[in-house]
Image: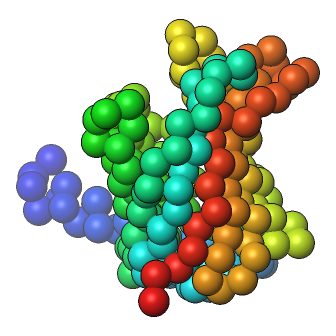
Amino acid sequence: MTVRRLLAFTLSALCLGVMAFAQNDKPGAEGEAHPMGPPEELKQFDFLVGEWTTDIQIKMTPEGEWTTSPATMKYEKGMDGSCIRGSFSTDFMGMPFSGLATLTYHRMKAKWQMSWIDNMGAYQSLYEGDLNDGILTLEGEDLAMGQINLVRDITTLKSDTEFDWEVHFSGDGGKTWWTTMKASYKKKS
């Protein structure tokens, strides 16, 4: 087959595929592309954009002592408004601690999703959940202290300038939970 025929065949197949895709006029039908651009639901979190401060409390074990450190979280829109990115920084155990979060709304699943990576764990954690009555609850798994833990990340929206945040761990498959991190954030003017 010549290069010209191969190119014509490839373009024809591509055109047929696009035409078949475009003729699917049933919303939500199998094989239909999801809407493009920023999810409408994400606008509920536009108020996050900016800088936030807190005194974060962390403990490494259920019986451990709380350690408190000043921290900041800077939020910005990302990917043309398709997500909100957060850049976190504090000092923890005498070392600089930083992390990156990405929050978005998965339209096809009708679920909120967040990814997290920090300079201590150096791996990515993924969480998914729901927003109900101003409380965003995301769940996933994380490797901590040598074992897989269930993680529940809870953000309670109090106003456009204040929110509470907690992270709970379960090392026994969700039978018991303990709080490992908590903070009350205030937006910097």
Q: Nearer the viewer, residue 23 or 115?
A: 115
Q: How is the image coloured?
A: rainbow
Does residue 39 appear in this view? no
The residue shown at (64%, 62%) is 184
The residue shown at (38%, 65%) is 14
The quarter of the rendered structure image containing the C terminus is bottom left
Residue 151 position, x and y percent, is: 69, 35
Does residue 7 appear in this view? yes
Relative side of 179 to 100, left or right: right
Residue 70 position, x and y percent, is: 44, 55
Residue 99 position, x and y percent, is: 39, 48
Q: Nearer the viewer, residue 145 or 31?
A: 145
Q: Residue furthest bottom?
A: 189
Residue 76 position, x and y percent, is: 41, 76
The residue shown at (28%, 42%) is 96
Snapshot quadrant of residue 23:
bottom right
Q: Is 95 above or below relative to 74?
A: above
